[in-house]
Image (tube, rainbow, N blue to C red):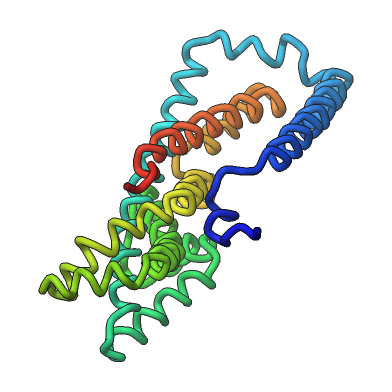
Amino acid sequence: MSRPLEDILFGAPSPQAQTVTRVVSVIAAAVLLLLAAGIALRFHSAGQLDARFWEFFAWPTTWAFLARGLLGTLASSAMAAAIALVLGLVLLVGRLARLRLVRWPSIAVIEFLRGTPTLLLIYVCFLVLPSAGIKLSTYWMLTLPIGLSTAAVVAEVYRAGVLAVPRGQTDAARSLGLTEAQVFFLVVFPQALRYIVPALVAQLVIVVKDTTFGYVVTYGELMQNAKVLIANYHALVPVYLVVAALYCLVNYAISRASKRLGGPMH
């Protein structure tokens, strides 16, 4: 008897699938370990793992400098994420509106922001706006373009979640006498969020990584501060390894925090 599509996509894997998954995971882990060992050996032979390239990490001033950069990254990414989540919802409502006068401009904004590279938007804030008399701080020159670019993607993620909510939920809410706004914000959208948590987390991770464009406007984020350390101590590999670990910790914390929002629906 064939399994229904919903059971295949969201149900527990079969014993055969679990066995295949474990075997593939072991093989992938072994390959990654061998690759990491090969990379470490190359770094060692090139002298990048010598103690003289690591000793400055024992200084409190080094970690304080990296901490300031990390705080800059978190401040920019948090504000950009807030802009993206709120503006994305506004664009979603506009795209789903019945009035063409509202729907088509919303679609145009979404497609424009989705199709424009974030780096180009940063250059607009950095070079074009000042020539027009609009001066932004380096914080907003980085944060605003990231937020706008991500908002367009988030709007489409929201829309996918809304379309995934069963039609019967909307019909049932309308039969209770709820207005269209109440149906959307009280019934449809809360359920849609449950479907799209993984996609939203992926976008938040991208927001954090996009803050590395801060070098364009000389904003003091983590990667910018890392480049200062590299220039002063010529420790390219050690600094980038430490900074990569910090980024991984931040993104892991985002993933862990999102699990509460993405719990099973009852």
Q: Between 157 and 50, which is closer to the camera in this rendering?
A: 157
Above or below, 74 against 100 in this view is above
How far across and down, in percent of the image, does residue 212 sit? 53, 45
Outermost residue toward the bottom? 100
How far across and down, in percent of the image, does residue 251 sit? 50, 37
Q: Between 23 and 209, which is closer to the camera in this rendering?
A: 23
Above or below, 185 against 105 in this view is above
Above or below, 156 against 72 in this view is below
How far across and down, in percent of the image, does residue 123 sit? 50, 62
Q: In this view of the protein, can residue 217 be seen by the observer?
A: no
The picture quadrant where one finds residue 26 is top right
| Total numbered circles | 0
How far across and down, in percent of the image, does residue 158 sit? 39, 63
Quadrant the N terminus occupies: bottom right
Outermost residue toward the front? 1
Identify the residue at image location x=37%, y=52%: 194
Q: Is residue 249 left or right of residue 78?
A: right
Identify the residue at image location x=27%, y=86%: 98
Q: In this view of the protein, can residue 243 be seen by the observer?
A: yes
Identify the residue at image location x=31%, y=66%: 134
Q: Is residue 207 left or right of residue 223?
A: left
Identify the residue at image location x=42%, y=61%: 154
Q: Is residue 238 left or right of residue 153?
A: right
